[in-house]
Image (cartoon, helix red, strand yellow):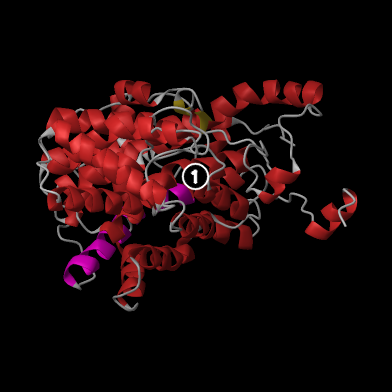
Amino acid sequence: MLRGFSSSPLLLCSSGASPIFNELKLSILRKHEAESPRIKTLLQRHGTAKLSESTVSSAYGGMRGVTGFVYEPSLLDKECGIRIRGLTIPECCEKLPKSWDGGDSPLPEGMLWLLMTGAVPNERQVWELHEELHRRADVQAIEAARKTIAAMPEEVHPMTQVGAGIMALQTYSKFASAYRQGRATKSNYWEYVLDDSLDLIARLPHLAALTYGRLKTGQTQVANPSNPDLDWAANFTNMLGFKEKSFWDCMRLYLSLHADHEGGNVSAHTTLLVASALSDPYLSLVAGLNGLAGPLHGLANQDALSYLFEMRDKCKAAGVDINDRGRLSAELEKLTWEVLNSKRIVPGYGHAVLSMTDPRYTCFREYCVKNFPDDELFVLTDAIYDVMPGILKKQGKVRNPFPNVDAQSGVLLQHYGLKECMFYTVLFGLSRQLGVLTGVVWDRLQGRPIERPKTTTSEALLKKFNIE
């Protein structure tokens, strides 16, 4: 049940906090106070109304189609894709502020503000939020994480290394400290969670860059020092060692569009579930990132890229010129049927909710068309896009025969020289924290209880339905 919020907004402005942090808090609070009476009326009038049906099939099938909880930052619409606070992906790309350093892509700082407040920020707000994140990139905390990462065997997966680094940062949790000291109460949990979340968002790019440096060189260090003049995505890409400004703008797009995808996916739901036990944001995010590391979730983009490489190599082995679109399409259709007839799936196609081409795929495709239309992998990806939906429709086993974001995202990274596929899930996690941490902030602000669904057993169901 939602609780009312009676504290005066002026009391929420900490004298030691920056003006933009206070402004962000007040913007969040105002949205909460505007919505809270309406949600209270909703619960009073329709609290017993059913949102969906839980069936025997859904109980065994991963709860597909079951609406089980409220998640404020975004909603997945099967007809138009993800809506971030009501805005579609094309609307986000159009409306969110762009970098002061040039480029056409939306700033992740703007996406974060939109997720948190429900409002599109202005240029001043994204600039000051950028400064706030640089200020929160505490050198001592990052060094503690660096030592933890450096102590791990080099062959450990980058996602595991990043997770260990976050756990090293957990000792800096303001929520955990306030809770231990009795300063955290139900009315201010969300403020400490917001504080921790901004710290995490500020520091995780450094952990990711350290991990990438180790993957590339064996040394746990960034390629270039942090530059406070650069925005969040550009600074991160520069710390990886990439100085091409067009890649910086590409990374802004990449990190903005992966930021959230409703609350029912594994990473989001896991983060919220762990946080519902009042675990601090560090513990909660690590849990979510561990889910993201699974082959059926965040590793899907690597599978899609591997499939793309396989198709490229087979086409070349057959003597097909990648730029001969007619012959390429014919060969891809033949190869695709061979894959399907061998009981394999085509990664990057289909989605659990969507019934159309993922708008994120479309956005990335448009970026490729504009910036490198002759790139070999993009030409191949686009040719697959031409033939695949028709093939999958004819096969009749896939509900949604259209591509999702994984079918295109790796192409951008490959083009700019970031070819270490093991690192791609780290990029996904770096982006996804923006959405899931917003979800945790709003869960604590709205006073959500610990999550505890009911379960059953096969024995109980067999008995219920008289199955001998």
Report the quarter where the N terminus lies.
top right
* Dot 1: element: helix
Q: Is residue 78 left or right of residue 348?
A: right
Q: Is residue 359 magenta?
A: no
What's the residue at 67%, 32% (across, down)?
Answer: 5
- For residue 364, which quarter of the picture? top left
Relative horizontal placement of residue 219, taking residue 76 as reference (left or right) = left
**Is there any visible trace of residue 88 in the rendered image?**
yes
Disc 1: which residue: 436
Residue at 89% across, 54% down = 463
Residue 443, image quadrant: top right
Left or right for 158, reference 45: left
Query: Which of 144/323 is in front?
Result: 323
The image quarter in which residue 70 lies: top right
Instruction: Give 453 or 304, whichever is nearer the viewer.
Output: 304
Answer above or below: position of 326 versus 201: above
Asked if the magenta segment contains residue 215, the reply would be: yes
User: In terms of depth relative to the viewer, which is nearer, 21 or 436?
Assistant: 436
- Magenta range: 196-217
Q: Main secondary structure of the magenta part?
A: helix
Work out whether 149 lies above or below 301: below
